[in-house]
Amino acid sequence: MNGGVELVLSPETLLRIFVAMLYIPAGLLAFRRIMPALSRPAKLLACILLALQLLLIVVAIEQQSESGFAFWLWHLDLEWNIPSIFSSAQLALIGGLALATAWAYREGGVVQRVYFAALAVIFIILGLEEFFAWKESITETAWRMNYFILGAAVIIVTTLVTAYSPKDERGPLIILLFGLAIMAIGGGIIDMLPEVCGDIGILRLDGCFYFYRSPEEIVEILGAWVVLLALLCRLSRGRATLSPRGWWLLHFFPLVWILLLVRYSPVNSFEVQPPAQRASVLFESNAQLHGFQTDGRGLPAIAFMFLPYDIELEQLGFSVHLVDQVSGESVASREVYAHRRYAVWPGGRGYEPVYAQAIDLHIPPAAPVNRALWIVLTHWRETGGQFLPQAVDASDLRLLNETQVVLGELALRAEATRSTSSPIAVFENGFTLNQVQIPERAQAGSTVNFSFDWETERHGREDYSQFLHFVPASPSEAGEAGASENGQWWGFDQLPLGARLPTRLWYSGLQDGETWEVPIPADVAAGKYALFTGLYRLSDLVRLEASDKNGRPYVDDRVPLGFLMIHR
């Protein structure tokens, strides 16, 4: 600033100020107005929870600048860690308190008992969702709308119940409304505030302050504590007081809940290895692909992305395409905006915040089957309505070009429609040659068609090529036509089903055929030729053993097909 005073704050310091401005007035108001009305067990429970959440927040703030395992373990906006467990237990405890209120309020009206029972169900579900993050299975727009509808409905019903309750019972319900409102502000308003960077009046922020990370969670935790205070107040006085045994059960409820969470947690240990194929692809945006996971069909399901906090996620995303290896056309695609909502810890010594990006790749009904498809990942940034691909700086995976990473390949399966009980040849790898259609005559210099039908009950693992040999027939075989003039044999090789489906992508249950267009050399000798076929491995050019349907091996692993008369 020009000659003025400038205060420099770090995002962590601003977060500490935010916590102080939030908790100091809330704590003073609670201890002055609400705590005196609580019974001794209720005060103990309220104080323990307040102390624990303050401890969690303090430790989480101290770990903001860390990049190791402690960062994940204490971060307020990540899943399956200590703050997530605490938030889940506090929400579930609210559900338990609401259920206890419904049970203890025997002299009250049916409406209030039903209301508290419904509130118990809602908060127990919220407690489960807080830990397991079920909302990640639907779009952000959908779960935000569902939360808005649910929150509005709870607040409206609570307002009506408060209005129609006796005056001596409205105090706890009014506190409950305040708590619900604070939770709604945290999840629905603060969550949508933009980040603050740079200068704020006389303040200069050394970094960016993100409202949708820790501040949102802090406000929601405080709001849940106020809701808990309201229910503790309801159980401490009036018609819904709780017995000493009931209070002991409520004190042990969070512990039981935490044990259940640990038992059924998706994280089985602190060193979690995501169920994905490992990868290391660095893009120019500094985002990095750590691995990916495929579903039962081999389609991409989840991408594990490293998204450093110093890059802006707005308009940042990636695309997954299935690209035909022959034509280069995309037959299916999905665009996904990047997010930091679902974090995993990939294990190892160093920690990087890796986030699971769900991919729901829809295959259109018209997508071609039995064709080799590349699974291609592209990272992009949307600018001015255009999707600008981010170049790949380093990759241990194959690249189609400087922006497209090949995650793998697959073939969409076709339904089996036929089966041949009398195959012509059975090869050692399980491939079966079922039917062959060959011409009787051909003209030298022309192109003729040969058709081959294949079937297999085993998966292909390697690339094989098929040969077609034209061998001059012996005089006894040639008959009146005679043998070919020069006695030289020749051949033609290609992949059995062409480039569209290499044998490495053949799958169990495959039934398919291919028509070859075979050129006949113009200078070939006229005469009768015996036709043979077979398979050989491309890696070492060794032929596969071939036998007939009865298991008798063919000589030289060549399958006889018949004869072709060539004219000049």
Image (spheres, grey):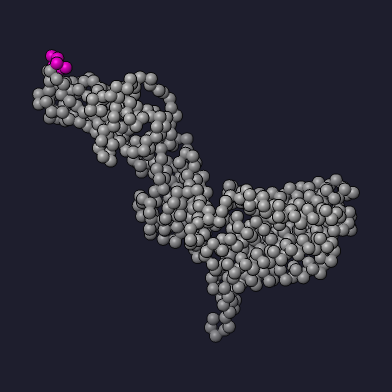
For residue 436, say whether it is visible: no
Residue at figure coordinates x 23%, y 20% from the top left: 562
Q: On screen, 371 above or below 56?
A: above
Query: In the rendered structure, does residue 477 fall within the stretch colored magenta?
Result: yes
In the image, taking residue 209 as reference, residue 383 lies left or right, namely left
Query: Which residue range is magenta in the image?
Result: 476-481
Could you say which quadrant of the image residue 421 lies in? top left
User: Where residue 121 appears, x then y in whole percent?
Assistant: 73, 48
Q: Is residue 33 left or right of residue 348?
A: right
Principal SS element in the magenta part?
helix
> In the image, what residue occupies the spot 81% across and 65% down?
35
Say if 62 sits above or below 339 in the image: below
Name the residue furthest left. Answer: 486
Q: Position of residue 521 (x, y in %)?
A: 16, 30
Asked whether, in this view, residue 327 is left or right of residue 24, the answer is left
Would residue 138 be found to the left or right of residue 320 on screen?
right
Write the residue at 19% across / 29% down: 520
Residue 473 lies within the magenta run: no
Say which quadrant the C terminus sits in.
top left
Q: Nearer the viewer, residue 9 or 248?
A: 248
Q: Nearer the viewer, residue 418 or 262?
A: 262
Whole-percent x and y of residue 101?
Answer: 82, 52
Residue 49 lies, in percent from the top left, at 73, 62
The quarter of the image holding the N terminus is: bottom right
